[in-house]
Amino acid sequence: MTGPAHTEAATPETRPAAGPVVSFADVRFTWPGAQAFTLSVPEFKLGPRERLLLLGPSGSGKSTFLSLLSGIVVAQDGEVEVMGTRLGKLGGASRDRFRVEHMGIIFQMFNLLPYGSVLDNVLLPLSFSPGRRARASAPTGNPEDEARRLLAALGLEPSLADGASAASLSTGQQQRVAAARALIGRPEIIVADEPTSSLDRDRQTQFLDLLSAELNAAGASLVMVSHDESLAPRFDRAARLADISLASREEPA
């Protein structure tokens, strides 16, 4: 399943990469427990600036796949390589630093700091990534300016940036804050877990248009998981998780 290729020219700020930015080779991961779930991925590659829609029903292993890609969990077998780095060779703290430096993640439940301000939430990754802080500061010298620009570009009312806590926002507003947090500092890879599932079709279209514009500016790759096949034409490639992986669940004896 494929969608139309994007033809926008890269901006001067994009960072070219040689070869895939993500690759899986003979990867196998098993969650422990009485009903152990195993995901196996013989081969997977994501190209520079590529936008991939990963489709599959609930329980098919999409979140496990994203956890492996982002180094939240480590495969028991095989290799996950991101930006030329083998994640399995890194310790837990090193994987955390690598992830925040090179990846922006839009979680399905957003995972915002509920009592932090909108700006606090957007700026949070910069506290752990000198590289992203430097890139976010480059336009004006103040990363807060970049945070406000992203929030405005994603359609959040400017008056909410300073005073409002994340807990006081609507679901759609929280989604925009989560997207700005993922995009700030222009990480090379954006990972999005069902980011449009709670939106109606009009708001979904608006959000994806705004996200696409920011991806173009950053030259970033995108992996977005969804159960909604109608989104496929908006992506360079769409694939069903079942076509690139094998999943099994061990029933208790």
Image (tube, rainbow, N blue to C red):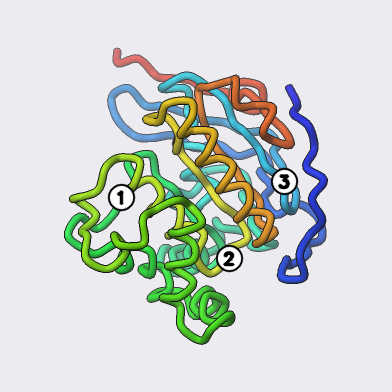
Q: Amino acid at mark 2?
A: Arg
Residue occupying image coordinates x 62% and y 33% = 53
Query: What's the distance in space between the residues labelled 3 and 2, CA to CA?
Result: 15 Å
The quadrant the N terminus occupies is top right
Disc 3 and disc 2 in contact, CB within 8 angstroms: no
Mark 1 = which residue? Answer: 111
Q: Amino acid at mark 1?
A: Asn
Mark 2 = which residue? Answer: 186
What x and y, as percent, mark residue 64? 46, 37
Helix, strand or loop at mark 3? loop
| Neighbours of disc 1 within 10 Å: few (<14), some (14-19), many (20+) | some
Taking the image as shown, residue 79 lies to the left or right of residue 33, namely right
| Neighbours of disc 2 within 10 Å: few (<14), some (14-19), many (20+) | many
Along the viewing direction, whichever of 113 and 128 lies nearer the viewer: 113
| Neighbours of disc 3 within 10 Å: few (<14), some (14-19), many (20+) | many
Compared to 111, does 250 lie above or below? above
Helix, strand or loop at mark 1? loop
Compared to 13, does 176 lie above or below? above
Q: Is residue 71 visible?
A: no
Taking the image as shown, residue 174 lies to the left or right of residue 226, namely left
* Mark 1 or 3, nearer chain start: 3
Query: What's the distance in space between the residues labelled 1 and 3, CA to CA?
Result: 25 Å
Taking the image as shown, residue 95 lies to the left or right of residue 31, namely right
What x and y, as percent, mark residue 167? 19, 51
Number of the label disc, if any, that sits on residue 40: none
Q: Amino acid at mark 3?
A: Glu
Along the viewing direction, whichever of 19 and 122 lies nearer the viewer: 122
Taking the image as shown, residue 205 lies to the left or right of residue 83, namely left
Disc 1 and disc 3 in contact, CB within 8 angstroms: no
Query: What's the distance in space between the residues labelled 2 and 1, CA to CA?
Result: 20 Å
Mark 3 = which residue? Answer: 50
Compared to 148, does 139 lie above or below? below
